[in-house]
Amino acid sequence: MRTITVNNGGVALNVLVAGPDNSDELPILCVHGWPELAHSWRHQIAHFAGARRRIAAMDVRGYGGSSKPQPVADYTLAALASDVAAVIAALGGRAILFGHDWGAPIVWNTALRYPEHVAAVAGLSVPFSPWGELRFLDVMRQLHAGKFFYQFYFMAEGVAEAELAADPDALLKIYHALSGDTEYPGFGRKGPDATLLEGVALPDPHPAWLPPHDLAVYQAAFAAGGWRGPLNRYRAQDIDFAEAESLRGQRIAQPAAFIAGTRDPVRYFAPGMDLYATAGAGCADFRGTTLIEGAGHWVQQEAAAATNAALSAFVDGL
């Protein structure tokens, strides 16, 4: 595996690349979510590179070895999709995209904005939802009125940054709380004035799917790079809505697939609804949903073999 740097208008993007450069097959590009790194795709990199397939994973801007601009407006989906398109260009001009958590909306929107560069797209954890006439945060304010919802907490600049930076176990607590190892208490169980980590316990024992040496990679990256960039992605959502006017109602035209854990809390973002039941509704060429029993939010790490099998089946079927 090697590391390359891709420049996109002054934003330097750190990209891990593995597998043969001389393959006639399309490369795969993986995009991570919050709060992760390209390292979260380590099992997929090993799997596909071992199968003689070129695969890359990028640190999203704001994370790891990539640039970390300060303005909220630098973290819109349009800006992040342009980063993905720049990496695709460096890989040859066309690629298959995998995205997890925020990486899923990023790759879905890259497919909409740069269709000539995206051959196929697989989303993990977050299904595609076509742009409509309602702002996401406005909908969540109605659904979670009077209750704690983490994205509301993230809006005030500096507040979540301070809490997360002050707790050396913040990442481990977040990873455990959203994994299939525990019974997630659900969105809205805390009062509106709670903090993110309030009531979130450390795991005992340590999660088997996240060895200490892997956790240390994340901890070192966030200690060095801070939390502002990753949190700015949430703060840019109203800008996204304004910039997406031309995309309203558009479906994903490329072959698409969805993969998630049965115990992923995102599944019940909207109280009383199973968001995974209609995961392919916004896709014109949907190749199916794979729900991995017992896995939580970090599906490609918690259930690496099952995720790799599902992704391989999708890629092989193209």
Image: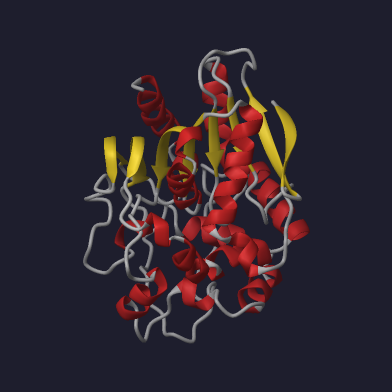
The residue furthest front is 246
Residue drawn at point x = 47 percent, y = 34 percent: 116
Q: Position of residue 227 (x, y in %)?
A: 67, 64
Q: Nearer the viewer, residue 143 or 268?
A: 143
Residue drawn at point x = 41 percent, y = 73 percent: 137
Q: Position of residue 60 (x, y in %)?
A: 62, 49
Residue drawn at point x = 36 percent, y = 27 percent: 314
Q: Nearer the viewer, residue 204 or 43?
A: 43
Tell how many labels: 0
Residue drawn at point x = 45 percent, y = 52 percent: 105
Q: Is residue 105 above or below residue 177?
A: above
Q: How was this image coloured?
A: secondary structure
Q: Quadrant of the N terminus?
A: top right
Residue 316 appears anywhere in the view: yes
Q: Quadrant of the C terminus?
A: top left
- Residue 136 left/right relative to 90: left
Q: Is residue 223 above or below residue 8?
A: below
Q: Is residue 222 above or below residue 24?
A: below
Q: Is residue 305 above or below residue 73?
A: above
Q: Position of residue 22 (x, y in %)?
A: 63, 12
Residue 34 lies in quadrant? bottom right
- Residue 266 left/right relative to 200: left
Q: Nearer the viewer, residue 48 or 164?
A: 48
